[in-house]
Amino acid sequence: MFHKEGHKIILITLFIVVAISLGADYLVNNSVIRGGIVIAAIALLVLVLQFFRNPKRSFITSDDTVLSPVDGKVVVIEKVFEKEFFKEERLQVSVFMSPINVHVTRYPVAGNVVFSKYHPGKFLVAWHPKSSEENERTTVVVNNKSFGNVLHRQIAGALAKRIVNYAKEGQVVEQASDSGFIKFGSRVDVFLPVDTKLDVTLNQKVKGGITVLARK
């Protein structure tokens, strides 16, 4: 199963792979070189298919938990001053996604979308300290009855050239449902109340909509 954001790219990639394979068969006489070109083209298609995969998952939702919005590795756990929406200190949990992770972004909590904004910006590597403020990004805040306002921020990286955000202010959203998609690698930050009890540790691998980041 593949995410809808990848359908067009998958078809284009498939067309390119077929064209390269036919061209190599017609133009390249050396069988070793021809075979290498075809294998490389197929490898490209496999990489694209893997990137846009959207595996079927069973979610256990609860207003008393905050779920990881994406697959990846926890790279930041720290108290920071969140200056865009809260304008006060918050507990930040950041999950870094490699190109081989599932890149669907899911709502970490259920509730009402009270803020949704897109910011154009740079494409610094996702682990750069200034990436959360200077890179292309989207900020979404969901008001949840247990945790209050929970912010998650999609951040583009050096490879990510497009962030898709489905959140609209006024929406009522379900926990673990699709919030957006980041094309080709990046990270997502989650901002929680400073007294939140976390269920994850630094460098832990997490799954979107499955791993509990925090609970009441």
Image (cartoon, rainbow, N blue to C red):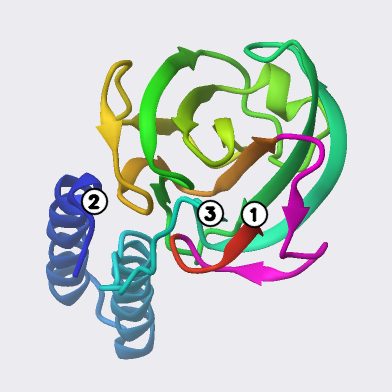
Q: Is residue 12 left or right of residue 131?
A: left
Q: Nearer the viewer, residue 137 or 211?
A: 211
Residue 54 x %, y %: 29, 65
Report if the CB atoms under discs 2 and 3 are less than 8 Å apart: no
Task: Based on the picture, tell me whether residue 200 belongs to the magenta stretch.
Answer: yes
Task: Give how far apart the Cα atoms at labels 1 and 3 are.
Answer: 5 Å
Query: Residue visible at 51% across and 13% down?
Result: 120
Q: Secondary structure at mark 2?
A: helix
Report which residue position mark 3 lands on: 64
Residue range corresponding to the magenta coloring? 193-208
Q: Nearer the viewer, residue 90 or 196?
A: 196
Report if the CB atoms under discs 1 and 3 are less than 8 Å apart: yes
Type of the residue with mark 2: Gly
Residue 68 x %, y %: 55, 56
Query: Residue visible at 26% across and 25% down?
Result: 171
Report which residue position mark 2 lands on: 6
Determine which quarter of the picture holds residue 135. Answer: top right
Mark whose residue sits in front, 2 or 1: 1
Q: Nearer the viewer, residue 105 or 46?
A: 105
Furthest toward the right, the residue is 79
Q: Secondary structure at mark 1?
A: loop
Mark whose residue sits in front, 2 or 3: 3
Query: Residue visible at 29% across and 72% down?
Result: 55
Residue 118 x %, y %: 45, 15
Report if the CB atoms under discs 2 and 1 are less than 8 Å apart: no
Sequence-wise, the earlier of marks 1 and 3 is: 3
Q: Is residue 105 above or below residue 29?
A: above
Q: Which mark is residue 216?
A: 1
Type of the residue with mark 1: Lys
Quadrant position of the C terminus in the picture: bottom right
